[in-house]
Amino acid sequence: MVPDVLGGFMQVVEHYSKPGAQVILPTPGHKPFFKLPLSLGRRVVAVPMLADGEGWKMDLEAIASCLEGEGGIVILCNPHNPIGKVYLKDELVALSKVVEKHHARVLSDEVHAPLVFSGHRHVPYASISDITAGHTVTITSAGKAWNISGLKCAQIIFSNKKDLDLWDSVCFMPEHNVGRLGLVATRAAYLEGGPWLGEVIAYCDANRKLLTSLLRGHAPCVGYREPQGTYLAWLDFRTSGLGDAPAKFLAEQAHVACEEGSQFGPEGTGFVRLNLAMPSALLVEAMTRIGRVLAKPRNHTA
């Protein structure tokens, strides 16, 4: 147990890689993952994901090229924040072959694992084989799915004895600040929170589908692929005429708060990340406002 996922991330990078090691981050990626390894003297190497008509996938050839002769840690975010992708088992197996060949490791962030929609299934990376169990440290929490992040209780999951033995030698301080209320809430969530989680998933599922309809009616120029997991929508404003900072425009003109896609890596420029976990009425209001401002003529300056 550790207080939070990002704190656990820091501990894993510090104790399971060497100073100067590279941390491979498929992008667009979770914002803190760009900065935290740098504070520990590691190098962040962003590897853009590949996008096609079927969605996003990791560029395994590029990852292999980065790992060649260097190794390091590959960050796996599954379900993926911000794009909402839930990785197929075959995709994870393919990644494991690259990682094992180059004697690297995987740090698997599975904090959104409970939030997966019908038709998709979360596969814990370390569970696939003895090989993945041997080179993986997994971090998760009840914080996202049950909205208890502020209570400070995340989990690092070890899948081989060598990694666990190392943790046992350094774990006192990382575990020291876990919240007591977080322990109680986490236990309640995992043991008794299934019905509540089911309602949350159903509500967010309805919202992700509602967003498809709302965009079609109010902002057809905005690209959107319904997320397979998480409660996040990744919206493509690149053809909307809003430039490289659409979130800034939406906040100022539509009074709708999103996060700028460029914060998740250069591949996110022109995108925004929208939180779907809101009352449906507010989602309708937000898309109505966005549609209204997109319909207005705008002056373009060089």
Image (cartoon, rainbow, N blue to C red):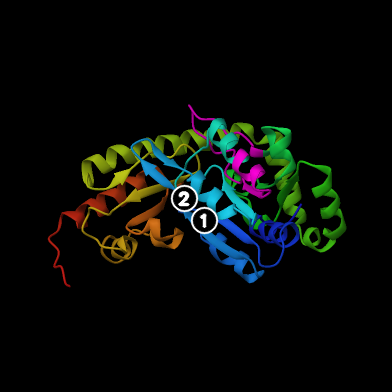
Label 1 and label 2: CA atoms lie apart by 7 Å
Picture quarter with the C terminus: bottom left
Residue holding disc 1 = 30
Where is residue 189 shown, x and y percent of the image? 68, 40
Query: Can residue 55 be seen here?
Result: yes
Q: Is mark 1 on a helix, strand or loop?
A: loop
The residue at the point 55 percent across, 31 percent down is: 90
**Residue located farthest toward the top when viewing the structure as drawn:** 119
Q: How many labels does the image show?
A: 2
- Answer left or right for 45 relative to 96: left
Residue holding disc 2 = 82
Residue 205 occupies quadrant: top left
Question: What secondary structure do most residues of the magenta stretch adopt?
Answer: loop
Q: Does the magenta stretch include residue 104?
A: yes
Q: What stretch is highlighted in magenta?
A: 97-125
Where is residue 254 shown, x and y percent of the image? 27, 60
